Amino acid sequence: MPKLYRAFPALLLATCPGLFAQKPVIYPNGVVNAASYSRSVKGEALVVGGAIFSIFGENLAASEQEAPGTPLPIVLGGTSVTVAGIDAPLFYVSPGQINFQAPNAISRRVGERVPVVVATAAGASDPVLAFVQQDAAGIFSQGEGGCGQGVVQNVAADGSVSLNTPLNSASPGSYVVIYGTGMGPLYSPPEDGHPAGTDPFTGVLFPAIDLGIEGFRFHLNGPVSWSGLTPGLVGVHQVNVRLDDDAFEGCAVPVRLTSRVIGSGPPATISIRKGGGPCQDAPKVSFANVGWRKMITTSDDSPSGVAEERFTASFSSAPENLAVPFPDPADPPSRGCPCGGLPVRYASRCKLAGLTALDAGALRLEGVPGGPLTVLPSPSIGEASYGMPLPPGSLEGGTLRVTAAGGAGVGGFDTDVTVPAPIEVTTPLTPGTVIDIRRPFSVDWSGGSPDAVVQMQLIAYHDPEGILGAACTCQVLASEGTVELGMGQNLEGEVLLRIFNRSENAEVVLTVSPRMSKLTRVSAPGLTREGRHEWSYEYRFKGLKIR
Protein backbone atom coordinates (compact mmCIF):
# COMPACT_ATOMS: atom_id res chain seq x y z
CA MET A 1 0.00 0.00 0.00
CA PRO A 2 2.63 2.58 -0.93
CA LYS A 3 0.14 5.34 -1.79
CA LEU A 4 -1.74 4.94 1.49
CA TYR A 5 1.53 4.95 3.39
CA ARG A 6 2.71 8.09 1.64
CA ALA A 7 -0.45 9.88 2.74
CA PHE A 8 0.06 9.22 6.46
CA PRO A 9 2.97 11.57 7.15
CA ALA A 10 1.46 14.28 4.97
CA LEU A 11 -1.64 14.93 7.08
CA LEU A 12 -2.45 18.61 7.57
CA LEU A 13 0.66 19.97 5.86
CA ALA A 14 0.53 23.33 7.62
CA THR A 15 3.46 25.49 6.63
CA CYS A 16 4.43 28.61 8.44
CA PRO A 17 6.62 31.06 6.48
CA GLY A 18 9.08 32.91 8.61
CA LEU A 19 12.65 33.88 9.13
CA PHE A 20 14.50 30.59 8.77
CA ALA A 21 17.60 32.10 10.36
CA GLN A 22 15.78 31.96 13.68
CA LYS A 23 16.09 28.90 15.87
CA PRO A 24 13.17 26.44 15.83
CA VAL A 25 10.31 26.81 18.30
CA ILE A 26 8.04 23.96 19.43
CA TYR A 27 4.61 25.16 20.53
CA PRO A 28 3.71 24.37 24.17
CA ASN A 29 2.32 20.82 24.27
CA GLY A 30 2.86 20.78 20.48
CA VAL A 31 3.87 17.11 20.26
CA VAL A 32 0.78 15.04 19.41
CA ASN A 33 -0.35 11.71 17.97
CA ALA A 34 0.08 12.06 14.18
CA ALA A 35 -3.21 10.23 13.48
CA SER A 36 -5.66 11.84 15.91
CA TYR A 37 -3.64 14.92 16.94
CA SER A 38 -4.44 14.02 20.54
CA ARG A 39 -2.23 14.85 23.51
CA SER A 40 -1.68 12.85 26.68
CA VAL A 41 -4.55 11.97 28.98
CA LYS A 42 -3.45 14.99 31.04
CA GLY A 43 -3.44 17.33 28.03
CA GLU A 44 0.33 17.46 27.72
CA ALA A 45 2.72 16.77 24.86
CA LEU A 46 2.76 13.03 24.26
CA VAL A 47 5.03 10.25 22.94
CA VAL A 48 4.66 6.47 22.69
CA GLY A 49 7.64 4.32 21.75
CA GLY A 50 7.62 3.18 18.10
CA ALA A 51 4.54 5.23 17.10
CA ILE A 52 4.19 8.23 14.76
CA PHE A 53 3.94 11.72 16.23
CA SER A 54 3.76 15.27 14.94
CA ILE A 55 5.51 18.39 16.17
CA PHE A 56 3.91 21.79 15.57
CA GLY A 57 5.84 25.03 15.85
CA GLU A 58 7.80 27.66 13.92
CA ASN A 59 11.10 27.61 12.00
CA LEU A 60 11.16 23.80 12.27
CA ALA A 61 12.79 23.39 8.83
CA ALA A 62 14.06 25.51 5.96
CA SER A 63 11.64 23.91 3.49
CA GLU A 64 9.16 21.12 3.02
CA GLN A 65 10.84 17.72 2.65
CA GLU A 66 9.63 14.09 2.64
CA ALA A 67 11.73 11.05 3.46
CA PRO A 68 12.83 9.42 0.17
CA GLY A 69 12.26 5.89 1.50
CA THR A 70 13.10 3.50 4.32
CA PRO A 71 14.91 3.16 6.58
CA LEU A 72 13.84 6.67 7.53
CA PRO A 73 16.59 9.28 7.90
CA ILE A 74 17.40 10.98 11.19
CA VAL A 75 18.30 14.20 9.34
CA LEU A 76 15.96 15.56 6.66
CA GLY A 77 16.48 18.91 4.94
CA GLY A 78 18.92 19.90 7.67
CA THR A 79 16.39 19.20 10.46
CA SER A 80 16.76 16.59 13.19
CA VAL A 81 14.69 15.59 16.23
CA THR A 82 15.74 13.97 19.48
CA VAL A 83 13.44 12.40 22.07
CA ALA A 84 15.06 11.85 25.47
CA GLY A 85 18.36 12.48 23.70
CA ILE A 86 17.73 9.71 21.13
CA ASP A 87 17.64 10.48 17.40
CA ALA A 88 14.13 10.11 15.96
CA PRO A 89 13.49 8.87 12.38
CA LEU A 90 11.78 11.51 10.23
CA PHE A 91 8.87 11.10 7.76
CA TYR A 92 8.37 14.75 6.89
CA VAL A 93 9.60 18.22 7.83
CA SER A 94 8.35 21.73 7.05
CA PRO A 95 8.61 25.13 8.73
CA GLY A 96 5.40 24.47 10.71
CA GLN A 97 5.21 20.71 11.17
CA ILE A 98 7.38 17.61 11.57
CA ASN A 99 6.21 13.99 11.49
CA PHE A 100 8.54 11.52 13.21
CA GLN A 101 8.70 8.07 14.74
CA ALA A 102 9.23 8.08 18.50
CA PRO A 103 12.22 5.86 19.38
CA ASN A 104 11.29 2.43 20.73
CA ALA A 105 13.71 2.84 23.64
CA ILE A 106 11.49 5.39 25.39
CA SER A 107 9.01 2.57 26.13
CA ARG A 108 11.18 1.86 29.16
CA ARG A 109 10.32 5.32 30.55
CA VAL A 110 6.52 5.09 30.74
CA GLY A 111 5.14 7.63 33.22
CA GLU A 112 8.09 10.00 32.81
CA ARG A 113 8.39 13.28 30.94
CA VAL A 114 11.19 13.35 28.39
CA PRO A 115 12.58 16.29 26.38
CA VAL A 116 11.76 16.68 22.67
CA VAL A 117 14.19 18.94 20.79
CA VAL A 118 14.27 20.09 17.14
CA ALA A 119 17.64 21.16 15.68
CA THR A 120 18.36 23.03 12.42
CA ALA A 121 21.30 24.99 11.05
CA ALA A 122 19.99 27.95 13.08
CA GLY A 123 20.31 26.07 16.37
CA ALA A 124 18.30 23.86 18.71
CA SER A 125 14.83 24.56 20.06
CA ASP A 126 14.08 24.84 23.72
CA PRO A 127 13.00 21.39 24.88
CA VAL A 128 9.34 20.55 25.32
CA LEU A 129 8.63 17.84 27.87
CA ALA A 130 6.44 15.03 26.50
CA PHE A 131 4.66 12.52 28.71
CA VAL A 132 5.56 8.91 27.86
CA GLN A 133 2.54 6.60 27.74
CA GLN A 134 2.48 2.88 27.08
CA ASP A 135 -0.12 3.43 24.38
CA ALA A 136 -2.25 6.24 22.96
CA ALA A 137 -4.24 4.79 20.09
CA GLY A 138 -5.33 7.11 17.30
CA ILE A 139 -7.00 6.39 13.95
CA PHE A 140 -5.73 8.16 10.83
CA SER A 141 -8.34 10.34 9.15
CA GLN A 142 -8.97 10.80 5.44
CA GLY A 143 -9.32 14.57 5.81
CA GLU A 144 -7.27 17.21 7.56
CA GLY A 145 -7.04 17.83 11.26
CA GLY A 146 -7.34 14.26 12.53
CA CYS A 147 -11.18 14.33 12.60
CA GLY A 148 -13.94 12.67 10.62
CA GLN A 149 -13.86 9.65 8.30
CA GLY A 150 -11.14 7.23 9.34
CA VAL A 151 -8.64 5.50 7.10
CA VAL A 152 -10.50 2.18 6.97
CA GLN A 153 -10.52 -0.46 4.26
CA ASN A 154 -13.48 -2.70 3.48
CA VAL A 155 -12.49 -6.32 2.86
CA ALA A 156 -14.60 -8.15 0.26
CA ALA A 157 -15.34 -11.88 0.35
CA ASP A 158 -12.67 -12.46 -2.31
CA GLY A 159 -10.06 -10.69 -0.19
CA SER A 160 -9.94 -7.49 -2.25
CA VAL A 161 -9.92 -4.21 -0.35
CA SER A 162 -11.39 -0.75 -0.97
CA LEU A 163 -11.43 2.51 0.97
CA ASN A 164 -14.43 2.94 3.28
CA THR A 165 -16.37 6.11 2.35
CA PRO A 166 -19.99 7.27 2.59
CA LEU A 167 -20.42 5.94 -0.97
CA ASN A 168 -18.70 2.64 -0.17
CA SER A 169 -19.94 1.41 3.20
CA ALA A 170 -18.86 -1.71 5.04
CA SER A 171 -21.58 -4.28 5.62
CA PRO A 172 -22.36 -5.72 9.06
CA GLY A 173 -20.78 -9.16 9.24
CA SER A 174 -17.90 -8.21 6.94
CA TYR A 175 -14.27 -7.52 7.76
CA VAL A 176 -12.62 -4.10 7.85
CA VAL A 177 -9.03 -2.97 8.38
CA ILE A 178 -8.54 0.15 10.52
CA TYR A 179 -5.24 2.06 10.34
CA GLY A 180 -3.78 4.07 13.20
CA THR A 181 -0.74 4.49 15.40
CA GLY A 182 0.17 4.46 19.08
CA MET A 183 -1.42 1.12 20.00
CA GLY A 184 1.61 -0.59 21.65
CA PRO A 185 2.94 -2.58 23.46
CA LEU A 186 4.31 -4.69 20.58
CA TYR A 187 5.74 -8.14 20.03
CA SER A 188 9.07 -8.10 18.17
CA PRO A 189 9.18 -4.43 17.10
CA PRO A 190 11.53 -3.62 14.20
CA GLU A 191 14.44 -1.23 14.56
CA ASP A 192 13.67 2.48 14.65
CA GLY A 193 12.94 3.81 11.18
CA HIS A 194 12.65 0.35 9.62
CA PRO A 195 9.40 -1.01 8.15
CA ALA A 196 7.58 -3.88 9.81
CA GLY A 197 8.19 -7.30 8.34
CA THR A 198 6.29 -10.55 8.05
CA ASP A 199 8.81 -12.97 9.56
CA PRO A 200 7.73 -12.56 12.25
CA PHE A 201 4.66 -10.32 12.17
CA THR A 202 4.70 -7.61 14.84
CA GLY A 203 1.56 -7.95 16.92
CA VAL A 204 -0.11 -5.62 19.43
CA LEU A 205 -1.17 -6.67 22.94
CA PHE A 206 -4.80 -6.36 24.07
CA PRO A 207 -6.38 -4.58 21.06
CA ALA A 208 -10.10 -4.15 20.44
CA ILE A 209 -12.50 -1.66 18.85
CA ASP A 210 -15.88 -0.33 19.85
CA LEU A 211 -18.63 1.35 17.88
CA GLY A 212 -21.10 3.94 19.12
CA ILE A 213 -21.51 7.27 20.88
CA GLU A 214 -19.94 7.91 24.29
CA GLY A 215 -22.60 7.57 26.97
CA PHE A 216 -24.70 5.10 24.97
CA ARG A 217 -24.49 1.37 24.41
CA PHE A 218 -21.53 0.15 22.36
CA HIS A 219 -21.19 -2.78 20.03
CA LEU A 220 -18.06 -4.40 21.38
CA ASN A 221 -16.16 -5.79 18.41
CA GLY A 222 -13.39 -7.81 19.93
CA PRO A 223 -11.18 -9.59 20.33
CA VAL A 224 -10.03 -8.55 16.89
CA SER A 225 -8.88 -11.01 14.23
CA TRP A 226 -5.39 -9.53 14.21
CA SER A 227 -3.69 -6.31 15.19
CA GLY A 228 -0.13 -5.16 14.72
CA LEU A 229 2.25 -3.15 12.58
CA THR A 230 1.36 -2.98 8.90
CA PRO A 231 4.03 -4.91 6.95
CA GLY A 232 6.19 -2.63 4.81
CA LEU A 233 5.34 0.53 6.77
CA VAL A 234 6.99 2.33 9.70
CA GLY A 235 5.00 2.87 12.89
CA VAL A 236 1.59 2.26 11.26
CA HIS A 237 -0.75 -0.05 13.16
CA GLN A 238 -3.65 -1.93 11.66
CA VAL A 239 -6.61 -3.67 13.26
CA ASN A 240 -8.40 -6.41 11.29
CA VAL A 241 -11.87 -6.95 12.71
CA ARG A 242 -15.16 -8.55 11.70
CA LEU A 243 -18.10 -6.21 12.32
CA ASP A 244 -20.94 -7.73 14.31
CA ASP A 245 -23.89 -8.98 12.29
CA ASP A 246 -26.04 -6.37 14.07
CA ALA A 247 -23.44 -3.57 14.03
CA PHE A 248 -24.74 -0.01 14.00
CA GLU A 249 -25.45 1.38 10.54
CA GLY A 250 -25.00 4.96 9.38
CA CYS A 251 -22.81 7.40 7.50
CA ALA A 252 -20.70 8.42 10.49
CA VAL A 253 -20.62 5.62 13.08
CA PRO A 254 -18.01 6.50 15.74
CA VAL A 255 -15.23 3.89 15.93
CA ARG A 256 -12.48 3.79 18.54
CA LEU A 257 -9.38 1.70 19.09
CA THR A 258 -9.07 0.44 22.64
CA SER A 259 -6.55 -1.35 24.82
CA ARG A 260 -6.45 -2.69 28.35
CA VAL A 261 -3.64 -0.35 29.31
CA ILE A 262 -4.91 3.21 28.76
CA GLY A 263 -8.44 2.62 27.47
CA SER A 264 -10.05 4.17 24.42
CA GLY A 265 -8.52 6.62 21.99
CA PRO A 266 -10.38 9.49 20.28
CA PRO A 267 -13.04 8.35 17.78
CA ALA A 268 -12.99 8.53 14.00
CA THR A 269 -16.00 7.53 11.89
CA ILE A 270 -16.85 4.64 9.58
CA SER A 271 -19.71 4.18 7.11
CA ILE A 272 -21.75 0.99 7.61
CA ARG A 273 -24.78 -0.29 5.72
CA LYS A 274 -26.11 -3.80 5.28
CA GLY A 275 -25.05 -4.94 1.82
CA GLY A 276 -22.56 -2.07 1.46
CA GLY A 277 -22.89 0.76 -1.04
CA PRO A 278 -23.98 4.34 -0.21
CA CYS A 279 -24.61 4.89 3.49
CA GLN A 280 -27.95 5.91 4.97
CA ASP A 281 -28.54 7.50 8.38
CA ALA A 282 -31.41 6.50 10.62
CA PRO A 283 -34.02 9.08 11.72
CA LYS A 284 -32.91 11.27 14.60
CA VAL A 285 -34.09 11.30 18.19
CA SER A 286 -33.59 14.13 20.68
CA PHE A 287 -33.03 13.97 24.42
CA ALA A 288 -31.81 15.97 27.43
CA ASN A 289 -29.62 15.57 30.50
CA VAL A 290 -29.89 18.13 33.31
CA GLY A 291 -27.73 17.71 36.39
CA TRP A 292 -26.49 19.18 39.67
CA ARG A 293 -23.25 17.93 41.20
CA LYS A 294 -21.30 18.56 44.40
CA MET A 295 -17.78 17.14 44.73
CA ILE A 296 -15.76 17.20 47.95
CA THR A 297 -12.09 16.28 47.58
CA THR A 298 -9.76 15.45 50.46
CA SER A 299 -6.04 15.31 49.62
CA ASP A 300 -2.56 16.11 50.94
CA ASP A 301 -3.02 19.69 49.74
CA SER A 302 -6.43 20.06 51.36
CA PRO A 303 -6.85 17.53 54.21
CA SER A 304 -10.05 19.21 55.40
CA GLY A 305 -11.63 18.92 51.95
CA VAL A 306 -12.46 21.29 49.10
CA ALA A 307 -16.01 21.47 47.73
CA GLU A 308 -16.98 22.27 44.14
CA GLU A 309 -20.60 22.58 42.99
CA ARG A 310 -21.69 22.76 39.38
CA PHE A 311 -24.77 22.72 37.14
CA THR A 312 -24.68 21.19 33.63
CA ALA A 313 -27.26 20.52 30.96
CA SER A 314 -27.17 19.15 27.44
CA PHE A 315 -29.82 18.93 24.74
CA SER A 316 -28.83 16.74 21.81
CA SER A 317 -30.02 14.77 18.83
CA ALA A 318 -28.51 11.70 17.19
CA PRO A 319 -29.55 8.89 14.81
CA GLU A 320 -31.88 6.63 16.79
CA ASN A 321 -29.85 3.50 16.14
CA LEU A 322 -26.69 5.14 17.61
CA ALA A 323 -28.42 6.62 20.66
CA VAL A 324 -29.25 3.28 22.28
CA PRO A 325 -29.27 3.77 26.07
CA PHE A 326 -27.56 1.35 28.39
CA PRO A 327 -30.17 -0.69 30.25
CA ASP A 328 -30.92 0.63 33.72
CA PRO A 329 -28.98 -1.32 36.36
CA ALA A 330 -30.76 -3.51 38.87
CA ASP A 331 -32.90 -1.46 41.24
CA PRO A 332 -32.24 -1.92 44.13
CA PRO A 333 -28.59 -2.53 43.18
CA SER A 334 -27.24 -6.03 42.93
CA ARG A 335 -24.64 -7.24 45.40
CA GLY A 336 -21.01 -7.76 44.49
CA CYS A 337 -17.94 -5.69 43.73
CA PRO A 338 -16.58 -6.25 40.22
CA CYS A 339 -12.94 -5.32 39.76
CA GLY A 340 -10.87 -4.51 36.73
CA GLY A 341 -8.82 -1.97 34.85
CA LEU A 342 -9.63 1.71 35.09
CA PRO A 343 -10.21 2.94 31.53
CA VAL A 344 -9.01 6.38 30.51
CA ARG A 345 -10.89 8.11 27.70
CA TYR A 346 -9.45 11.01 25.78
CA ALA A 347 -11.38 14.23 25.48
CA SER A 348 -11.81 14.55 21.73
CA ARG A 349 -10.77 17.80 20.05
CA CYS A 350 -13.19 16.95 17.24
CA LYS A 351 -16.94 17.41 17.21
CA LEU A 352 -18.46 14.25 18.61
CA ALA A 353 -19.61 12.13 15.68
CA GLY A 354 -23.33 11.47 15.58
CA LEU A 355 -24.31 14.11 18.13
CA THR A 356 -25.80 17.52 17.40
CA ALA A 357 -26.23 20.03 20.22
CA LEU A 358 -29.66 21.65 20.48
CA ASP A 359 -30.51 25.11 21.79
CA ALA A 360 -33.04 25.39 24.63
CA GLY A 361 -32.52 29.12 25.16
CA ALA A 362 -31.59 30.65 28.51
CA LEU A 363 -31.99 28.46 31.60
CA ARG A 364 -33.15 29.95 34.91
CA LEU A 365 -31.91 28.19 38.08
CA GLU A 366 -33.92 28.59 41.28
CA GLY A 367 -33.33 27.31 44.80
CA VAL A 368 -29.62 28.25 44.95
CA PRO A 369 -28.03 30.89 47.21
CA GLY A 370 -28.11 34.30 45.56
CA GLY A 371 -30.50 32.99 42.91
CA PRO A 372 -32.18 32.91 40.60
CA LEU A 373 -29.23 32.42 38.21
CA THR A 374 -29.24 32.48 34.41
CA VAL A 375 -27.23 30.02 32.31
CA LEU A 376 -26.76 30.68 28.61
CA PRO A 377 -25.71 28.08 26.02
CA SER A 378 -22.01 28.15 25.22
CA PRO A 379 -20.20 26.97 22.08
CA SER A 380 -18.98 23.42 22.58
CA ILE A 381 -17.24 20.74 20.55
CA GLY A 382 -18.89 18.04 22.59
CA GLU A 383 -22.38 17.30 23.79
CA ALA A 384 -22.58 19.49 26.89
CA SER A 385 -23.65 23.00 25.98
CA TYR A 386 -24.65 24.51 29.35
CA GLY A 387 -22.48 24.76 32.43
CA MET A 388 -22.04 27.00 35.47
CA PRO A 389 -20.20 26.81 38.81
CA LEU A 390 -22.67 27.17 41.65
CA PRO A 391 -22.44 29.23 44.85
CA PRO A 392 -21.29 27.30 47.94
CA GLY A 393 -24.18 25.58 49.68
CA SER A 394 -26.28 25.09 46.55
CA LEU A 395 -26.53 21.33 47.16
CA GLU A 396 -27.39 20.82 50.81
CA GLY A 397 -30.84 19.28 50.39
CA GLY A 398 -34.04 20.84 49.11
CA THR A 399 -35.81 21.57 45.84
CA LEU A 400 -33.96 22.90 42.80
CA ARG A 401 -35.81 24.20 39.77
CA VAL A 402 -34.80 24.71 36.14
CA THR A 403 -36.89 26.78 33.73
CA ALA A 404 -35.98 26.95 30.03
CA ALA A 405 -36.97 29.92 27.90
CA GLY A 406 -36.93 27.72 24.82
CA GLY A 407 -34.77 27.94 21.72
CA ALA A 408 -34.48 26.76 18.14
CA GLY A 409 -34.17 23.06 19.07
CA VAL A 410 -36.05 22.65 22.35
CA GLY A 411 -39.13 24.54 23.54
CA GLY A 412 -39.75 26.07 26.95
CA PHE A 413 -40.18 23.82 29.99
CA ASP A 414 -39.72 23.73 33.74
CA THR A 415 -38.60 20.87 35.97
CA ASP A 416 -38.03 20.43 39.70
CA VAL A 417 -35.77 17.94 41.46
CA THR A 418 -35.72 17.18 45.19
CA VAL A 419 -32.19 16.67 46.45
CA PRO A 420 -31.75 14.85 49.80
CA ALA A 421 -29.32 16.11 52.42
CA PRO A 422 -25.74 14.93 51.90
CA ILE A 423 -24.41 11.92 53.76
CA GLU A 424 -21.66 12.26 56.35
CA VAL A 425 -18.78 9.80 55.89
CA THR A 426 -17.75 8.52 59.33
CA THR A 427 -14.87 6.20 58.36
CA PRO A 428 -11.56 8.06 58.77
CA LEU A 429 -9.93 8.37 55.33
CA THR A 430 -7.41 11.13 55.88
CA PRO A 431 -4.42 11.37 53.52
CA GLY A 432 -1.82 8.73 54.41
CA THR A 433 -4.41 6.20 55.63
CA VAL A 434 -3.21 2.64 54.92
CA ILE A 435 -5.74 0.11 53.61
CA ASP A 436 -4.94 -3.57 54.24
CA ILE A 437 -6.49 -5.25 51.21
CA ARG A 438 -5.98 -8.68 52.82
CA ARG A 439 -8.91 -7.85 55.07
CA PRO A 440 -12.45 -6.74 54.22
CA PHE A 441 -12.56 -3.01 53.60
CA SER A 442 -15.67 -0.98 54.43
CA VAL A 443 -16.76 2.64 54.46
CA ASP A 444 -19.55 3.87 56.76
CA TRP A 445 -21.70 7.00 56.71
CA SER A 446 -24.67 8.54 58.46
CA GLY A 447 -27.77 9.81 56.70
CA GLY A 448 -28.74 8.50 53.29
CA SER A 449 -32.08 8.35 51.54
CA PRO A 450 -33.68 4.99 50.61
CA ASP A 451 -34.34 6.59 47.19
CA ALA A 452 -30.58 6.91 46.54
CA VAL A 453 -27.66 4.57 45.98
CA VAL A 454 -24.03 4.87 47.06
CA GLN A 455 -21.33 3.60 44.76
CA MET A 456 -17.88 3.07 46.23
CA GLN A 457 -14.74 2.75 44.13
CA LEU A 458 -11.44 1.69 45.64
CA ILE A 459 -8.83 2.76 43.09
CA ALA A 460 -5.18 1.70 43.15
CA TYR A 461 -2.99 3.73 40.81
CA HIS A 462 0.26 2.24 39.60
CA ASP A 463 1.89 5.63 38.95
CA PRO A 464 2.19 8.96 40.77
CA GLU A 465 0.27 10.73 37.98
CA GLY A 466 -2.91 8.76 38.68
CA ILE A 467 -3.27 7.53 35.08
CA LEU A 468 -2.76 3.77 35.13
CA GLY A 469 -4.68 1.81 37.72
CA ALA A 470 -7.37 -0.66 38.69
CA ALA A 471 -10.60 -0.31 40.65
CA CYS A 472 -13.21 -2.35 42.47
CA THR A 473 -16.74 -0.92 42.42
CA CYS A 474 -19.45 -1.72 45.00
CA GLN A 475 -22.98 -0.30 45.15
CA VAL A 476 -25.63 -0.36 47.89
CA LEU A 477 -28.72 1.60 48.91
CA ALA A 478 -27.73 4.83 50.63
CA SER A 479 -29.98 4.00 53.58
CA GLU A 480 -27.79 0.99 54.49
CA GLY A 481 -25.06 3.26 55.84
CA THR A 482 -22.15 0.99 54.92
CA VAL A 483 -20.54 -0.63 51.90
CA GLU A 484 -17.92 -3.39 52.06
CA LEU A 485 -15.36 -4.80 49.69
CA GLY A 486 -14.43 -8.20 51.09
CA MET A 487 -12.82 -11.48 50.24
CA GLY A 488 -16.17 -13.18 49.87
CA GLN A 489 -17.63 -10.75 47.32
CA ASN A 490 -17.30 -12.24 43.83
CA LEU A 491 -13.52 -12.41 43.97
CA GLU A 492 -11.12 -14.62 45.86
CA GLY A 493 -8.63 -12.88 48.08
CA GLU A 494 -5.63 -13.80 45.95
CA VAL A 495 -7.28 -12.18 42.90
CA LEU A 496 -7.79 -8.93 44.83
CA LEU A 497 -4.19 -9.02 45.95
CA ARG A 498 -3.01 -9.56 42.38
CA ILE A 499 -5.10 -6.63 41.10
CA PHE A 500 -4.08 -4.17 43.78
CA ASN A 501 -0.73 -5.50 45.06
CA ARG A 502 0.78 -2.33 46.60
CA SER A 503 -0.06 1.26 45.82
CA GLU A 504 1.39 4.46 47.21
CA ASN A 505 -1.30 6.42 45.35
CA ALA A 506 -4.79 5.14 46.05
CA GLU A 507 -8.16 6.79 46.54
CA VAL A 508 -11.70 6.03 47.61
CA VAL A 509 -14.57 7.61 45.68
CA LEU A 510 -18.13 7.59 47.03
CA THR A 511 -20.87 8.74 44.65
CA VAL A 512 -24.42 9.28 45.91
CA SER A 513 -27.10 9.51 43.21
CA PRO A 514 -30.82 8.71 42.79
CA ARG A 515 -32.04 5.19 42.12
CA MET A 516 -33.06 4.71 38.51
CA SER A 517 -36.69 4.22 39.47
CA LYS A 518 -36.61 7.54 41.33
CA LEU A 519 -35.08 9.68 38.59
CA THR A 520 -36.89 12.88 37.69
CA ARG A 521 -37.86 12.88 34.02
CA VAL A 522 -37.91 15.91 31.74
CA SER A 523 -40.36 16.50 28.88
CA ALA A 524 -40.24 19.47 26.53
CA PRO A 525 -41.38 20.46 23.03
CA GLY A 526 -38.78 19.19 20.57
CA LEU A 527 -37.64 16.25 22.70
CA THR A 528 -38.64 12.86 21.32
CA ARG A 529 -37.42 11.05 24.44
CA GLU A 530 -37.85 11.85 28.11
CA GLY A 531 -34.77 13.50 29.51
CA ARG A 532 -33.18 13.05 32.92
CA HIS A 533 -32.95 15.59 35.73
CA GLU A 534 -30.29 14.25 38.12
CA TRP A 535 -28.21 15.18 41.15
CA SER A 536 -25.12 13.65 42.74
CA TYR A 537 -22.76 14.04 45.66
CA GLU A 538 -19.19 12.82 45.13
CA TYR A 539 -16.67 12.33 47.93
CA ARG A 540 -13.05 11.77 46.83
CA PHE A 541 -10.46 10.71 49.42
CA LYS A 542 -7.00 10.94 47.86
CA GLY A 543 -3.51 10.25 49.17
CA LEU A 544 -4.31 6.77 50.54
CA LYS A 545 -1.99 3.76 50.48
CA ILE A 546 -2.64 0.05 49.89
CA ARG A 547 -0.56 -2.64 51.55
Image: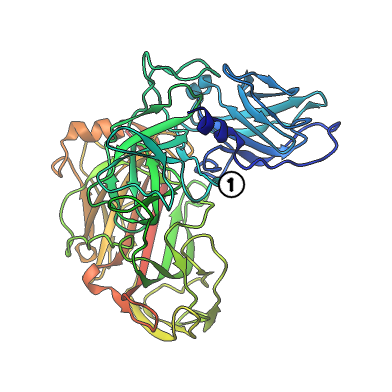
> Which residue position holds label 1?
144
Percent position (x, y) of residue 283? 34, 69
* Image: 257 above or below 127: below
Q: Residue furthest top?
A: 199
Q: Quadrant location of residue 313?
A: bottom left
Q: How many numbered dots are placed on residues in this image?
A: 1
Amino acid type shown at disc 1: Glu
Residue 179 point in image, percent of width and height: 44, 36
Q: Nearer the viewer, residue 516 or 198?
A: 198
Using the image as rendered, state which of residue 279 and residue 431 is in the foreground. Answer: 279
Where is the C terminus found, in terms of image quarters?
Answer: top left
Quarter of the image holding residue 399? bottom left
The outermost residue toward the left is 488
Label 1 neighbour load within 10 Å: few <14, some 14-19, many 20+: few
- Vertical placement of residue 415 versus 443, above or below: below
Q: Residue at x 21, y 47 (%)?
A: 337
Camera sees residue 505: no
